[in-house]
Amino acid sequence: MAWRRPEARVRSGGALALLALALCAPAARGRALEWYSALVSTAYVDPQTNLTVRSVSESGRFGDSSPREGAQGLLGLPDGHPEGCDPDTRFHVPAPGGRAAAPWVALVARGGCIFKDKVLVAARRNASAVVVYNEERYGNLTAAMSHAGTGNIVVIMVSYPEGRGLRELVQKGIPVKMTIGIGTRHVQELISGQSVVFVAIAFITMMVISLAWLIFYYIQRFLYTGSQFRSQSHRKETKKVIGQLPVHTVKRGEKGIDVDAENCAVCIENFKAKDVVRILPCKHIFHRTCIDPWLLDHRTCPMCKLDVIKALGYWAEPEDTQETPAPGSTPGSVSAANSSVAAPDEGRSEGSSFTASATHESAPQCGAALKDDTGENTALLGEWPADYKTLSRYQSSKEN
């Protein structure tokens, strides 16, 4: 099983954080970083009392693309629709004594078209500023206005009640002078309360998922490390046990092994002089370099499936491996796997004799043969007939 590294958990946590920020970003992008309020001062003469009525309040709001500077002039209303969206719209500006009004400020209603179109229509009529009053449904509120591309004309928004009152005065033919000044700078809050809650929930969820992944990873890593340690320890013990099996160096002309006819069932190569062979408890022989790796992984004889470790008296638990037969072995054939050699301990010299026995039984019966031969003296190799055709007769004579 392939384990993911902790860096992958960190990357997945970072991806969740970026996702949370991306979801919050649309609300933030729609708002300006800062905006300025506008001081709105009006003055007109009440026709009933002939008194000048003045009003000053910080009730306006500069548009996003408007220059932050003052402007003044008499208020003028568009002819026809109050929104002033028609490019051919003309404006009516009441002036004292009927003389021409210059400069003048356009007073238009919100809606009907985009803010940019309203401002451009008034700018073409040489208005010094444009005052947009909000819709009735918003009450006393003002809103941000996006009108990029309108030049240096001053643009502000006032509330609906204030704009309606000024409109009624102008409709009555009363000249109203408006002066616009710069108000207070306001920093726009980019994160609302809902966004804070959403980010907090996303952060907590990300932390819980990351913590769960880390706990799962380190538990699995601990189990995997323990399994590897036990496996390595088991292989070391198995290697020591395999080292107790007798070995023998093959000599040409040696009785019991025909170097030109017999072969190793693992590598399917004939035994040659000076080859070092390993002798298993079931008396099958193999090249030491071939059988040792096999026994480390499988622990059993490739021919008869005898558990070599148990046969030597070590009752370790077998590994969970799939046993596969050695290549080239066929039932009933007479080969090096069917004729076995038992060598004396490694402490003896190479010239010393070693015991052997032969059998024509099938491979699964080797385990039973091992039990029958335990504790008995086997014949020396020198007593074996060189001709394998007399093996059966030789064995029968020994048993009798």
Image (cartoon, grey):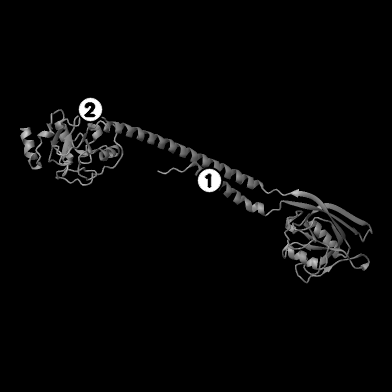
Give 67 or 393, whichever is nearer the viewer. Answer: 393
Q: Secondary structure at mark 1?
A: helix
Q: Which residue is mark 2?
A: 347
Does any portion of residue 83 appear in the rendered image?
A: no
In the image, what residue occupies the spot 94% across and 66% down? 97
Tell me how far mark 2 sits from mark 1, CA to CA: 61 Å
Q: Position of residue 23 (x, y in %)?
A: 60, 51
Q: Which mark is residue 391?
A: none
- What residue is rendered at 48% in x and 42% in y? 5
Q: Earlier in the sequence, mark 2 or mark 1?
A: 1
**Residue 82's quadrant in the figure?**
bottom right
Question: As drawn, is 252 to the left or to the right of 139?
Answer: left
Residue 2 screen position, x and y as percent? 42, 44
Instruction: Name the foreground residue: 10 vs 235.
Output: 235
Quadrant of residue 135 in the image?
A: bottom right
Residue type at numbered disc 1 = Arg
Circle 2: residue type: Gly
Question: In what element is the residue under mark 2?
Answer: loop
Any part of residue 311 in sight: yes
